[in-house]
Amino acid sequence: MAEWPAKVANAVEGLAETVRSKAVHPLETVARAIVFGVIVASVGLMLLIFMAVGTIRVLNVYLFAGQEWASYLIVGGIFVLAGAFLSSRKRARRT
């Protein structure tokens, strides 16, 4: 009879560990993936914006001095071509 409290405590501890390993750990992994995904997407978007602005500035200074519209046309054309390529690669949804 003296071992009964220790057995109950071990059973409760085992149950808590099982619940943690089956429920909490996978949710923790998903939450980490979401957080890191948002961080990577934010950094990627910032880099894309910086590259577009830098490209326009370089084209304005070195290639098309005084004709900013040409720089915007080239960078805009690159984005249009990239968007058209990505649009052609998408698949139709099955309903």
Image (spheres, rainbow, N blue to C red):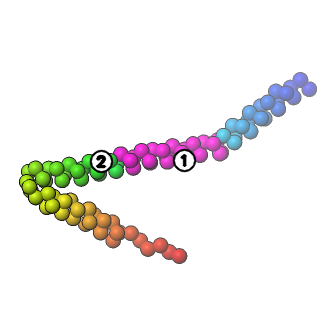
Q: What residue type is labelled 1?
A: Val
Residue 75, how many percent across, how many down?
20, 59
Query: Image height check: is 57 above or below 8?
Result: below
Residue highlighted by disc 1: 30
- Amino acid marked by disc 2: Leu
At a point 63% along the width and 42% down the height, the residue shown is 24
Q: What is the number of the mark on residue 49?
A: none
Q: Position of residue 91 (x, y in %)?
A: 41, 71
The x and y percentages for residue 79 are 26, 62
Please tell me which residue is depicted at 77% across the width and 35% down the height of the picture: 12
77 w.r.t. 7: above or below = below
Examine the structure image and report whether residue 36 is included in the region drawn in magenta. Answer: yes
Which portion, as a residue range, is magenta?
Answer: 21-43
Q: Quadrant of residue 18 in the image?
A: top right
**Badge 2: how crowded within 10 Å, few (<14), some, or many (20+)?**
few
Name the chief secondary structure element in magenta. Answer: helix
- Which of these two is toward me, 22 or 93? 93
- At a point 66% along the width and 40% down the height, the residue shown is 20
Q: Residue 56: x, y in percent? A: 18, 53
Residue 74 at least partly seen: no
- In front of the other: 1 or 15: 15
Name the element at disc 1: helix
Quadrant of residue 9 within the rendered picture: top right
Extreme residue in the bottom direction: 95
Q: Do the residues labelled 1 and 2 touch (CB within 8 Å)?
A: no
Residue drawn where x is 15% and y is 61% of the image: 69
| Residue 47: assigned label | 2
Q: Is residue 49 left or right of residue 22?
A: left
The answer to whether 13 is drawn above or below residue 36 in the figure is above
Decide: is 25 above or below 59. Answer: above
